[in-house]
Image (spheres, helix red, strand yellow):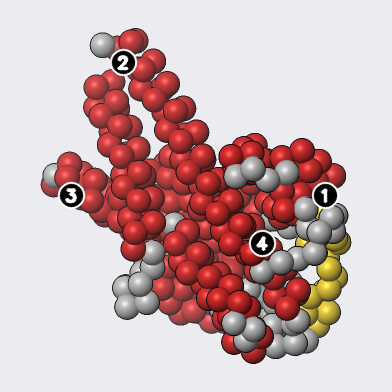
Amino acid sequence: MEPKSLYNYLLISQITIILGFIADLIFGDPRWFPHPVKGIGHLIKKLEPFFRKKIKNERNAGIFFTITIILIVFLITLLIIFVSITVNVWLFLLISAFIIYSSISLKDLKLHVLKVYDDLKNNDIILARKDLSMIVGRDTENLNKDEIIRATIETIAENLVDGVLSVLFWAFIMGAPGAMLFKTTSTLDSMVGYKDEKYKYFGMVSAKIDDYMNFIPARISMIIIPLAAFIYRKDVRNCIKIIKRDRKKNPSPNSGIPESAFAGALKIQLGGLNFYNKIPVYKEKIGEPLKKLEIDDIKISINLTYISSFLFLIFFICIFCLIYYLLYTIYF
């Protein structure tokens, strides 16, 4: 690729990310919309029985299954992008922006979380449990008010990385195919990446790949979230303190970072006893209970998520502006 072509491609790719991000802020994920993730989920459901039947060793079956799903989705995305860019640059821009838009889940997270927030404000614990069950994997039918708030904040923190920052990161690195590549690994993890009897070995590789894909974005969030807390006038010092102390307490190598950051900024404590399919699972406590959990902590967490997302976007735009400048000065 010639320097001028590379320069133009990089520039257009960054524009598609900005357009995709803005589109998500405006439209979210309408339920009627034929979302690509639904297609990935359908593919996973169809191919899982096939690989389990053909390969008796569960771990090997899971490896080939995961690689096959990732390759199919990635190559289809690459083909669509290649065809679009050969037809017209505007078609390339539109399709790339759409793929990135469909991979981000910022507004959708906000809408789901605000349902729980409104339920709690209306003192409707039963409806709050039901709405919470749509966004968490744990059992919700017996949760009290404080446990609902805690579960909501934990899923907001985790989804900041998994649903927004990692998508943007891989989109900046590899364009629209990168965003879809990450979304595929994330969907695989959410569907088969469990440690129960059924998926302990079959879903092991899917879970590991998802951990690797989230690794760098989660660590960048160690800088981004405290900056967001500073802008939002929350406790930055405690935020940094809890990140340093508690970020490794979550069983996930990545989720503990945003959770500890949110716990520190809000001066609350996360973690504790959860139930998954009636099975008790205890997670180490993160943060210090310097104040009681409050319903408004949910809204504060969403606002921190939005600020963090904007900061992350601006951070990478600045990096690529520097790259553009260097390319321009060297080759032009």
**Under tag 1, what secondary structure?**
helix
* Residue plotted at (27% across, 36% down): 12
The image quadrant that residue 201 belongs to is: bottom right
* Residue for badge 4: 297
- Residue at the spot x=51%, y=51% of the render? 306
Which amino acid type corresponds to the residue marked 1 in the rendered image? Asp
Q: Is 241 on the left-hand or right-hand side of 66?
A: right
Q: Which residue matches tag 1?
A: 246
Between discs 1 and 4, the one toward the N terminus: 1
Taking 180 as reference, is 144 left or right?
Answer: right
The residue lying toward the viewer, choosing from 43 and 28, is 28
Between the C-alphas of marks 4 and 3, the distance is 42 Å
Q: Residue at x 26, y 11 (%)?
A: 332
Q: Which residue is mark 2?
A: 328
| Label drawn at residue 80 | none
Label 1 – label 4 distance at C-alpha = 20 Å
Determine which residue is flagged by label 3.
91
Q: CA distance from mark 3 to mark 1?
A: 46 Å
Whole-number angstrom distance, CA of label 2 to CA of label 4: 46 Å
Query: Is the N terminus in the top left, top right, bottom left or bottom right quadrant?
Result: top left
The answer to which of 92 and 115 lies nearer the viewer is 115
